Amino acid sequence: MMLKKTILAATVALTAGAVWAEPQAEVLHWWTSGGEAKSVAVLMEEFAGRGGTWTDMPVAGGGGDAAMTALRARVLSGNAPTAVQLKGPAIQEWYEEGVLANINAVGVEQNWDELLPTAIADHMKCDGEYCAAPVNVHRVNWMWGNAQVLADAGLEMPTTWAEFNAAAEKLQGMGITPLAHGGQAWQDATMFESIAVGLGGAEFFQAAFVDLDEATLTSDTMVAVFDQLRTLRGFVDDDFSGRDWNLATAMVMNGEAAFQIMGDWAKGEFMAAGLEPGKDFLCAPTPGGGYLYNVDSFAMFSVEGDDKIAGQNLLAELIMGENFQEVFNLNKGSIPARLDVALDSFDYCARRSGYDMDVASGNGSLMPSYAHGMALRGAQAGAITDTVTAFFNSDMSSADAVAALATAVKNSM
Amino acid sequence: MTDTSTQRTGDFKNALLRAGLYAMLILFALYYLMPLFVMLVTSLKSLDEIRTGSLLGLPRDVDFSAWGKAWSGACTGVQCEGLRPYFWNSVLIAVPAVLISTFLGAMNGYVISQWHFKGSNMIFALLLFGCFIPFQVILLPMAIMLGKMKIAGTISGLIFVHVIYGLGFTTLFFRNYYITIPVELVKAAKVDGAGFFRIFWSIFVPLSAPIVVVTVIWQFTQIWNDFLFGVSFSQAGTQPITVALNNIVNSTTGVKEYNVDMAAAIIAALPTLLVYVVAGKYFIRGLTAGSVKG
Amino acid sequence: MEWLQRHMPKMVLAPSFFAVLLFVYGFIAWTAYVSFTRSRLLPKYEIEGVIQYERLFESPRWEVAITNLAIFGILFIGIAMILGLLLAILLDQKIRTEGALRTIYLYPMALSFIVTGTAWKWILNPGLGIEAVVKDMGWESFEFDWLTDPDMAIYTVVIAGVWQSSGFVMALFLAGLRSVDEEIIRAAMVDGVSTARIYRSIIIPSMAPIFMSALIVLSHLAIKSFDLVIALTGGGPGYATDLPATYMYAMAFSRGDLGQAASSATVMMMVVVAIIVPYLYSELRTRRD
C-alpha cells in the first residue's frame, strides 16, 4: 500500500513538473561586442518575459573557433549546452553525430515553411525536420564606397568587374587606395567568392562551391576568377596583411581608400561613426551581382530535463518571432530571416538587401556563402580558403592555383 | 655573488665598460617595456585618438574611462559587467591548484632526489616528458574523462586538470633543488631513527622557501593565464578571467574598443604582475641551487 | 609498519606516476588511435588505416608548419637562451638598479598573449608601428615589414616569443651564476685568470642543471606556442606562420577534422620524442648528483 502511494505521488510530481517546467536555457554564442550583445539581450529579455531563465555562455573569437572548442569539450563530457550558435552545414554535421534535439513541433506549429525562403529553411532542417532556428540573413557580397571620394573622381559604384578595374586604375592615379582590405584568410575568401559569383553567376557558384564539381573547379571561369583576384591584389595598399576588417572599413570612412568588399556588418561601423548610407557612404552588390547569404542560427542540442526542453522550444519560438527578428536585425545590420517582417524602419542598404533576397530566392540565385561556412563543411571550406589565401599572399599563377584548389578539395574529403 | 667585475684594469676602461654595460641593459629594458608602454598609453586614450594618432604617442587627454569599463562595464556576452565577476573564479581555480601541485611536486622531488629506488629516475623522466605535451592533444580525451568523473564544467574539474599538467614542472623544480642537498643528511637522520615524513618536515621543508617561491610563481603564471583549459572545461558561472578577457578583446563582427581591450588585459595581468614584483627577489634566491652549506 | 616505511617513497610517487600514465600517455595513445580513424567532428573508433597520414603529408600547409617549427624552435630556444644568459651575466655585475631591471625583464611572462599579441601586432605593423615611427622621424627609406612578408613573418613570431620568455631564462641563469662556489672563483682570480675565461671555464659549465631546466622550459613554450601565433599573425600571411600546434587546433576545432588533428599531433609528438628523449637520457644518466 505504501509503495503504491509513493509511486502515485512520484508520478504526480513528475507530471506536474513536466507541465509546469520553467524554461531553462544555457546558450553558447560568440556575440560579445557592444552592438551584438545588445542584440542578444533582446532575446534574453523576451525569454525572461515568458518565465524563462537564460544562462549566458559566451566565448568570443575567430568567428566561433573558441566556441566550437568549448562545444566539443562540453558534448564529449556529456554536458552539452541547451542552445548553440551554429550555422550552415555544421548543423547537419552535429546532427550526424547524434547530439541534436528536434524542434520540429515548434516549426510546424509556427508555420516556418511559409515564413522562410526555401534555401534557408533547408539549412535549419535535419533529415527534413527542424533542428535550428534562424536569426538573421547577412549579405556577404556587398561593396562599400566613400561617397565623397567617388564623387570627386567622377565615378559611380561599378556594376561589372571590368568597370571596377577601370575605376580602380583611375583612383590609383589620383593617389587613393582603390580597395581597402584586411589580409586575413576569411577576408581573402570573402573577396574571392564575391568575384566568383559575379563573374560566373549563381550556377557556376553552385557547381563549384556547393557541389564541389571538379570540372567546374578547374574550368576557365575559375582561372578568370583567380585572375581577377590577382588584379585586386594590385589594388590594395602594402600594409594589408593581418589587418582587421574594421580597420579596413575605417580607411574607406576617412577617404584613404575608395572601396571595401565586406558583408553587411560593415554598415554597423559606418553608422557607429555617424555616417549616413546613400549620403556619406554608398552600398551596392559587388560587381556582377549575385546574393551570397550568411545565416546565423541557434541549434538545439540533445539535453535532459523538461525545463531545458521547454527552454529550447520557447527559444525557437521567440527567435522566429516578429519582434525579435526586427529588433535584433536593426541592431546588428543584417535583415530578418522571416520574409514577412516589414523593413520600413531599416536603412536603405538593408531594404535593398531584403528586396534583392526576395528576387534571388524567386529565381534560384540565392547562394550560401562558402567563406562564412554556409555552403560547405569545415574541412572543405578550409581547404579552399588555404589555397585562396596562399594565392593572394604569393605570386602563384592562376593556373597553379586552380590545380592546387582541386587537389586541396580532394584531399580534404 | 660573483666578484669578477672588480678587476682593476684601468679606471678609464672600467668606466667605459660600466657605461657600456648600463647602456646595453637600458636598451634591452626598452625592448621589454615597449609593448607595455603601448598598452598603457592606448588604454588612456579615447577611441578617436587611437584611430588618428600615433602608436607610441602619449595621450592628449588622459582618459580613465576605459579602465572602469574594463573592470565593470565591458560586454563579455549578454552581460556587460566587465572582468569583475570572473576574477573570483580565477582565484578559486588558481590558488588551490598552485598549492596542491606545489605540494605534490615537493613530495615527488624529495622522493626522486633522496630516496632513489630502481626505476625512480625512469619515473622522473616519464613525469618530465609530460611537460612537452601540447594541451590541444589532451583536450578532447580529458573532456571525456571529466565527464565520466562527473566534474566537467566545475571549478574542481579545472583545478584537477591544472594539477595533473603541472606535476611535471613542479617535480622538476623541486628535484633539481633537493638533489643538491647532501645524501649524508638523510642518512644521518635515518640513523637517528627519523622516518620518511619526519625527515621531510624537519629537514627539507625549512630549506624549501626559495624553491617554493619559484614553483609558485611559475605555476601561478601558467594557471592564471591559461585560456584553453579554461574555455573548454568550464561553463557559465565557472569561467575564468582569461575567457572573459578573450570575449572582450576578440569579438569578431563588432566595433573594437582598443582602449578597453588594453585596460582589460592589464587588469587581468595584475595578480601575476604583483606576484612577480613582490616575490622577484625571492625568485632569484630560490633558484640558487647549492646554497646549502654544511 | 616496517614494510610501509620501506615502500613509502614508492607510494608517495605512485599517485603522480599513475596520473601521468593515464592523463599523458594514455591520452597520447588515444590520440594515436584516433589518427587511424576517419574522425570528423567528434571521435570515431573504427580503424581506417593510414589515410590521415597520407593526407597530412600531401598538405602544403603541414609542410609549412613543420618547417616553421624547426625555424621557430631553433631560433626561439637559441636566442632566448643566449639573451637570457647574456642578461644574467650583465645583471650579475653588481648593478645598482638590479631589482628594477630584473622585474622589467621578467614581467612579460606575466602577461597573457591574448592582448600583448595585439600590442606586438601594432608595433611590428609597417603602417602603424616601428616602420611608421622611424619614417616619421625622418628616415624615409627605413623598412621593417617582416610581419606582412610571408617569408619573414615567422621571424616576428621569434621576436615576440623571445620577448615573452627570455626574462624567465635570465632569472634561471642569474640564480645559477650566483650559486657557483665563491672559493673556486677567488682561487682562479688569484691565479690571474681573466674574467671571460672564468665565465667560460668555471661558471658556465657548472650550470648544467640550470641549462637543462631552461631548455625544458623553452622547449615546452616553443611547442605550446599557440596563443603567440594566433594573436600576432593569425597564422598568416596566408598560412606562412602556421605551426603544428595551430594546424592541429584548426583541424580539430575549426574544420571538424579530428582525424587530421590527431595525425598531426602524433607526428609532432614523435618529433618531440626524437629530440627530447635522447637529451633526457644523457642528462639523467650521467648526473647522479
Image (tube, rainbow, N blue to C red):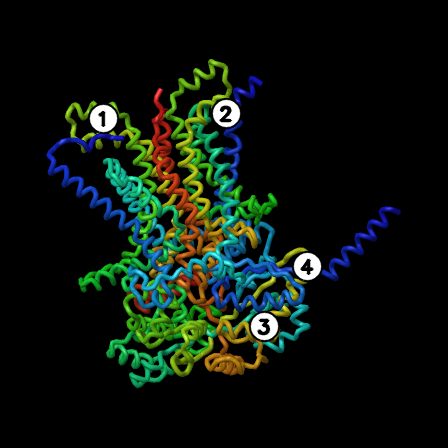
Q: Are marks 1 and 2 on the same chain?
A: yes
Q: Are marks 3 and 1 on the same chain?
A: no
Q: Amino acid at mark 4?
A: Asp
**Element on which disc 4 rests:** helix
Residue A228 visible in the current orientation: no
Residue that carries the numbered disc 1 in the rendered image: C185
Give the spatial CA distance, label 2 vs label 4.
51 Å
Q: Amino acid at mark 2?
A: Pro
Establish if B191 lies above or below B39.
above
Q: Quadrant of residue A122?
A: bottom right
Instruction: State which mark lies toward you, 3 or 2.
Output: 3
Q: Amino acid at mark 1?
A: Ile
Instruction: State which mark lies toward you, 4 or 1.
Output: 1
Residue at 30% over, 36% down:
C173
Chain letter belonging to callout 3: A
Give the spatial CA distance, label 3 vs label 2.
64 Å
> Where is residue C174 drawn, in percent x and y?
30, 36
Q: Which mark is residue C9?
A: 2
The reply to whether the C-beta atoms of the residues labelled 2 and 4 are less than 8 Å apart is no
> Where is residue B62 drawn, in percent x and y?
35, 61
Q: Quadrant of residue A126?
A: bottom right
Residue that carries the numbered disc 4 in the rendered image: A307
Residue that carries the numbered disc 3 in the rendered image: A324
Q: Amino acid at mark 3?
A: Phe
Residue B19 appears left or right of A182: left
Instruction: State which mark lies toward you, 2 or 4.
Output: 4
